[in-house]
Image: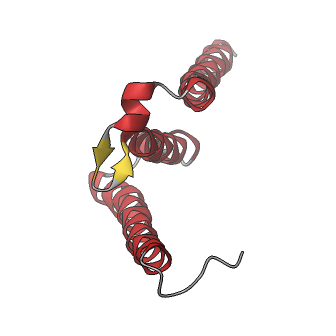
Amino acid sequence: MAHETSNHGSATKRIWTVFAILSIVTIVEVILGIIRPEFLVETHLFRMHLLNWVFIVLTLYKAYYITWAFMHMEHETKGLRRSVVWTGIFLVCYLIFILLTEGDYIFDVYHDGYISWDF
């Protein structure tokens, strides 16, 4: 009986720790979205505001941590962890690359006047 009680206490502590970490990251994202610091908005990195990169990195961190905590990846072998987590992160990074590349092309087409802004 004592083992079950200590295991339950550890699980409860783990849940609250995960909740606190994800809450802090989300609160930072919301605060940055509301106040939009000028140095993050005016600074560009790869033709995108630095603030957008901060959001992308924080979102990837949250996705990684959710996978790590709720899929119990910390208890799995190194190979399984890498195949699950890294595959997802690489796919998300590739999707971001495609969206940014295509979005930049469409912006250039509209900006250079080949097609009018009709929406």
The answer to whether residue 22 is left or right of residue 57 is: right
Location of residue 100 in the rendering, given as x and y in whole percent from the top left corner:
41, 67
The answer to whether residue 8 is left or right of residue 87 is: right
Numbered marks: total: 0
As drawn, the residue found furthest toward the bottom would be: 114
- Which residue shows up at 28% across the image and 59% down it? 79
Location of residue 118 in the rendering, given as x and y in whole percent from the top left corner:
69, 79
In-front residue for pair 43/58: 43
Location of residue 3 in the rendering, given as x and y in whole percent from the top left corner:
61, 18
In-front residue for pair 96/61: 96
- Which residue shows up at 48% across the image and 41% down it? 55
Residue 1 vertical position relative to residue 95 in the rendered view, above or below: above
Residue 85 vertical position relative to residue 61 in the rendered view, above or below: below
In-front residue for pair 35/11: 35
- Identify the image quadrant of the N terminus: top right
- Identify the image quadrant of the C terminus: bottom right
Residue 30 vertical position relative to residue 61 in the rendered view, above or below: above
Residue 46 vertical position relative to residue 13 in the rendered view, above or below: below
- Which residue shows up at 54% across the image and 24% down it? 28
For residue 86, which quarter of the picture? bottom left
For residue 75, which quarter of the picture? top left
Location of residue 99 in the rendering, given as x and y in whole percent from the top left corner:
46, 70
Rendered image coloring scheme:
secondary structure
